[in-house]
Image (cartoon, helix red, strand yellow):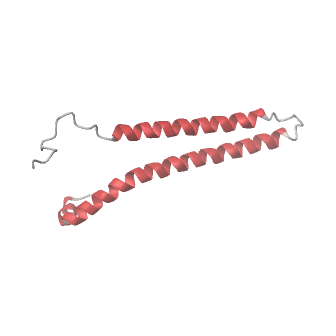
């Protein structure tokens, strides 16, 4: 972005733009994470469907535990992703200051 464009912004526009990007960032991360998870689940379901269709003409019995295993693995991956996401979000928060407050908390009568 050029300096001329920044110079033309009013303070209200700067505040508005800053708030917009503060809100949009976490929303985009959440949307991207959800889309990635859904895409992975859809790809896994398609792969599992192909495996089942290929196994049926071969007249080999498809184990009931195998699809359940994939479902459990997928749920585990999503759970780990949720934990990692929450840890990353917490690490981005500023830590409270260890210094005492600069003003008196209790008002004098």
Residue sitting at x 22%, y 65%? 12
- The picture places residue 108, in percent across and down from the top left corner, at 10, 47
Q: Which of 16/7 is in front?
A: 16
| Drawn side of residue 75 relative to residue 65, left or right | left
Query: In the displayed structure, would residue 61 be above or below residue 104?
Result: above
Q: Residue at x 49, y 52 (%)?
A: 31
Q: Is residue 63 left or right of residue 77?
A: right
Q: Position of residue 57 (x, y in %)?
A: 88, 41
Image quadrant occupied by the N terminus: bottom left
Could you tell whether 76 is left or right of 94 in the image?
Answer: right
Nearer to the camera, 48 or 99? 99
Image quadrant in which you'd find residue 65: top right
Q: Judge whether 76 appears above or below 15 on screen.
A: above
Q: Quadrant of residue 93?
A: top left
Q: Nearer the viewer, residue 21 or 105?
A: 105
* Count of numbered marks: 0
Q: Residue at x 40, y 50 (%)?
A: 26
Coordinates of residue 29 in the picture (x, y in percent): 44, 49
């Amino acid at each position: 972005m050029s300096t001329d464009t920044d110079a033309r912004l009013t303070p209200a526009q700067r505040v508005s733009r800053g708030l917009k990007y503060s809100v949009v960032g976490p929303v985009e991360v959440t949307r991207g994470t959800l889309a990635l998870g859904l895409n992975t689940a859809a790809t896994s379901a398609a792969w599992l469907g192909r495996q089942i269709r290929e196994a049926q003409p071969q007249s080999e019995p498809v184990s009931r535990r195998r699809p359940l295993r994939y479902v459990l693995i997928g749920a585990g991956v999503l759970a780990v992703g949720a934990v990692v996401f929450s840890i990353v979000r917490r690490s981005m928060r500023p830590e409270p200051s260890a210094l005492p407050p600069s003003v008196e908390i209790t008002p004098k009568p």
